[in-house]
Image (tube, rainbow, N blue to C red):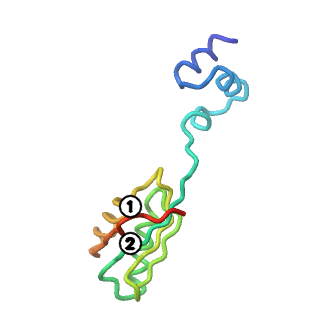
């Protein structure tokens, strides 16, 4: 085992075999050490103040701009937006803050639904 592989294992916390494999295959460290499997959740946020399709589009778009939001569907008639998101990248509180910056009232449910 090379000195490089031992250093790689020590610095990244990888086991020696994984470090050796990563070094041999020239795999970037982020792909073995820092990658987290997405954990997709669904949440319905109450949004007060949406009155038209432009309002719902604005809410959907501001949410989709957040890193980790997979999909957002706003419903003007039901005063809500359903959001599918990676809980490792974005929190429901960040979503609420983004909606509130648009000027709407946003309210989280008591508990996010598991997906």
Residue 109 position in % (x across, y down):
36, 69
Residue 96 position in % (x across, y down):
33, 66
User: Considering the image in quadrants, where does the C terminus appear?
Assistant: bottom right
Q: Tell me what residue is drawn at x 34 percent, y 77 percent.
A: 47
Residue 65 position in % (x across, y down):
44, 63
Residue denoted by label 2: 45
Compared to 11, does 27 lie above or below?
below
Residue denoted by label 1: 92
Q: Tell me what residue is drawn at x 62 percent, y 33 percent.
A: 28
Compared to 76, does 91 lie above or below?
above
- Give the Cα distance between marks 2 and 1: 9 Å
Q: Quadrant of residue 4?
A: top right
Q: Check whether the beta carbons of the residues at disc 2 and disc 1 lie within 8 A of each other.
A: yes
Mark 2 is surrounded, within 10 Å at the Cα level, by few (under 14), some (14 to 19) or many (20 or more) other residues, namely: many
Asked whether 85 or 22 is in front, the reply is: 85
Asked whether 26 or 72 is in front, the reply is: 72
User: Considering the image in quadrants, where does the N terminus appear?
Assistant: top right
**SS for callout 2:** strand
């Amino acid at each position: 085992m090379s000195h490089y592989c031992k250093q790689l294992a020590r610095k990244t916390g990888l086991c020696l075999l994984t470090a050796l494999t990563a070094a041999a295959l020239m795999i970037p460290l982020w792909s073995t050490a820092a990658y987290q499997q997405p954990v997709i959740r669904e949440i319905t946020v109450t949004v007060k103040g949406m009155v038209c399709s432009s309002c719902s589009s604005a809410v959907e778009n501001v949410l989709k701009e957040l890193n980790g939001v997979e999909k957002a569907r706003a419903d003007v008639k039901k005063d809500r937006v359903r959001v599918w998101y990676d809980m490792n990248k974005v929190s429901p509180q960040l979503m609420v803050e983004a909606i509130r910056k648009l000027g709407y009232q946003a309210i989280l449910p008591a508990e996010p639904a598991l997906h």
